[in-house]
């Protein structure tokens, strides 16, 4: 396993409410992506829509991945006023959500 400084990933899986339009989803995604410009501990942001053919998504359609340098950075992000304001809007448009924070481990075989 790889040592040294370890980043932390913040993964959010989302199922939007049926009444939320694609245009509204696009605006929410842009708002989420803009947090990287407002919250210093947030180092990277990626997102995508489920394309799996396995049909195991359990209704979750979108994945949002943010990168931080530490769990303290995630704590700062979560309490940041820009995140709090956005989260209130974003979470109100979701039917289901899962959030997982983890430290990626590269395993050499």
Image (spheres, rainbow, N blue to C red):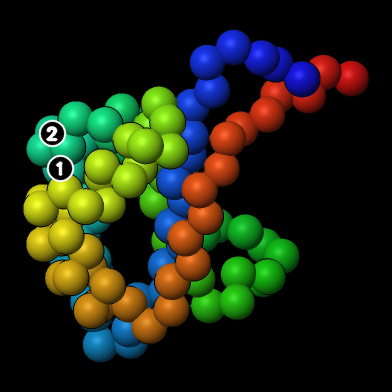
In the image, farthest residue toward the top: 4
How far is the residue under mark 1 from the one under mark 2? 5 Å
Q: Position of residue 50 (x, y in %)?
A: 51, 59
Quarter location, residue 72? top left
- Between 8 and 49, which is closer to the camera in this rendering? 8
Residue at numbered disc 2: 37
Residue at numbered disc 1: 34
The crowd level at tag 2 (other Cα within 10 Å; few <14, some 14-19, many 20+) is few
Q: Secondary structure at mark 1?
A: helix
Q: Secondary structure at mark 2?
A: helix
Q: Are marks 1 and 2 in contact (CB under 8 Å)?
A: yes
60 versus 33 height, above or below: below
Residue at 47% of width from left, 60% of height from top?
99
Residue at 82% of width from left, 18% of height from top?
108
Q: Which of the image's four quarters has the N terminus?
A: top right
In the image, farthest residue toward the right: 109
The crowd level at tag 1 (other Cα within 10 Å; few <14, some 14-19, many 20+) is few
């Amino acid at each position: 396993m790889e040592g040294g400084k370890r980043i932390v990933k913040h993964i959010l899986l989302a199922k939007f409410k049926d009444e939320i339009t694609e245009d509204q989803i696009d605006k929410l995604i842009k708002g989420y992506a803009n947090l990287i410009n407002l919250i210093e501990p947030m180092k990277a942001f990626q997102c995508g829509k489920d394309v799996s053919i396995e049909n195991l998504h359990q209704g979750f359609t979108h994945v949002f991945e943010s990168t931080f340098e530490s769990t303290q950075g995630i704590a700062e992000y979560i309490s940041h006023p820009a995140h709090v304001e956005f989260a209130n809007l974003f979470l109100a448009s979701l039917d289901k959500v899962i959030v997982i924070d983890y430290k990626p481990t590269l395993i050499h075989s």
